[in-house]
Amino acid sequence: MMYMLIYILTKYLPWHNGAFNIRQHKPEIARLKLTSLTNEVCIGEAKVLVDLLQSFYNMKYKDEPDYQYIIYTFEKILLELDVAPSPNNYDWILNYPNGNQERLLNLSNG
């Protein structure tokens, strides 16, 4: 999912080349994923994700992600963009028809 987010922000990944046939170049793509540095992957708008991606690169297969760190990092990015992090700040809640925002907020908060 991290690579998808980076691609959405940049329209670029080192191993993404429209000319590649994924089946034919699978070993090359795998090699690029294993050897690419975070600052080669996180360019442009995605530079804010370098530390988070590096933390993922440092994980072993059986490691459990540090979810608090992930949440903290995304909240920090939002604050740097002057966007207040809120679990209720979603378009589908804020623009919910017929004034039923309160009902939807109660459902989303468990």
Image (cartoon, helix red, strand yellow):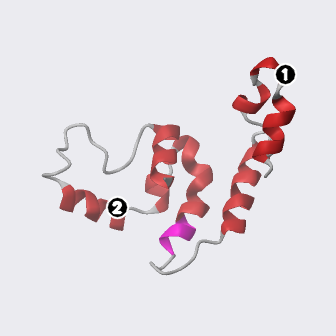
Give the tally of numbered discs. 2
Residue 77's place in the image compared with 91, above or below, is below
Q: Nearer the viewer, residue 89 or 9?
A: 89
Q: CA distance from mark 1 to mark 2?
A: 47 Å
Q: Main secondary structure of the magenta part?
A: helix
Residue marked by disc 1 = 99
Q: Is residue 97 left or right of residue 40?
A: right
Q: Nearer the viewer, residue 75 or 47?
A: 75
Which residue is at 50% across, 51% downward? 42
**Do residues under tags 1 and 2 come within 8 Å of each other at their CB atoms?**
no
**Does any portion of residue 82 appear in the rendered image?**
no
Which residue is at 76% across, 20% downward? 97
Whether the magenta-drawn stretch holds residue 95 is answered as no
**What amino acid is found at the position of numbered circle 1 in the picture?**
Gly
Q: Horizontal and vertical percent for residue 90? A: 73, 35
Numbered disc 1: secondary structure: helix
**What amino acid is found at the position of numbered circle 2 in the picture?**
Lys
Label for residue 33? 2
Quarter-of-image position of residue 49? bottom right
Q: Which residues are magenta?
A: 54-58
